[in-house]
Amino acid sequence: MNVPGALAEITAWAEPAAGGWRYLFSDSYRAQKHADWRHEHPGYVVLDLLGGIIGIGVSLAIAVFPVMAISGLLPN
């Protein structure tokens, strides 16, 4: 895989994770998403919500896993 392709993959993953965090902490982003969702199919809204939730979970795991590994809290 080339560098631009790898960056595109990382960006494609990071966007839902960032969107989930933005939805939680930004009133203006949340209002914008609600306005956008009014014009979308309910299935798309559910997928968007699931992507944000999964993105938050994965980003938390990426942050917590190294700390647990360094402190020896991971099972052998």
Image (tube, rainbow, N blue to C red):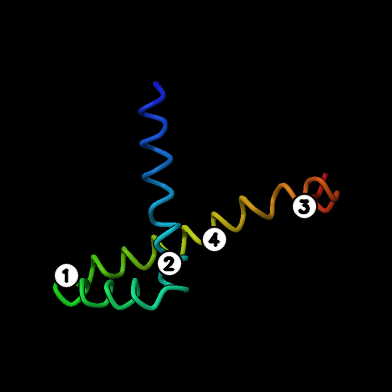
Q: Earlier in the sequence, mark 2 or mark 3?
A: 2
Which residue corresponds to mark 1? 40
Labelled disc at residue 69: none
Q: Three-letter amino acid code at disc 2?
A: Arg
Neighbour tally class for label 4: few under 14, some 14-19, many 20 plus, Cα within 10 Å: some
Label 4: element kind? helix
Q: CA distance from mark 2 to mark 3?
A: 26 Å
Asked if disc 2 and disc 1 are in contact, CB closer than 8 Å, the reply is no
Q: In the picture shown, does residue 10 fall above or below 59?
A: above
Quadrant into which the N terminus falls: top left
Q: Earlier in the sequence, mark 4 or mark 1?
A: 1
Tell me where residue 41 appears, x and y as whole percent.
Answer: 16, 70
The residues bearing labels 2 and 1 have C-alpha atoms spaced at a distance of 20 Å
Residue in the foreground of this view, choosing between 14 and 31: 31
Disc 4 to disc 1, how far (Cα)?
25 Å
Q: Residue furthest right?
A: 72
Residue lying at 72% horizontally and 47% vertically, measured from the top left: 66
The one nearer the camera, 74 or 13, is 13
Among numbered discs 2 and 4, the one appearing first in the sequence? 2
Element type where label 2 sits in the image:
helix
Name of the residue lying farthest toward the left: 39
The circle drawn on residue 22 is 2
Tell which circle, 3 or 4, labels the residue nearer the N-terminal end.
Answer: 4
- Spot the residue most to the top: 2
| Other-residue count near label 3 (Cα within 10 Å), few / some / many at <14 / 14–19 / ≥20 | few
Residue sitting at x 28%, y 72%: 33
Sequence-wise, which precedes: disc 2 or disc 1? Answer: 2
Contact, CB < 8 Å: mark 4 with mark 1?
no
What residue is rendered at 18% in x and 77% in y? Answer: 38
Mark 4 lies on residue: 57
Instruction: First in sequence, mark 3 or 1: give its number.
Output: 1
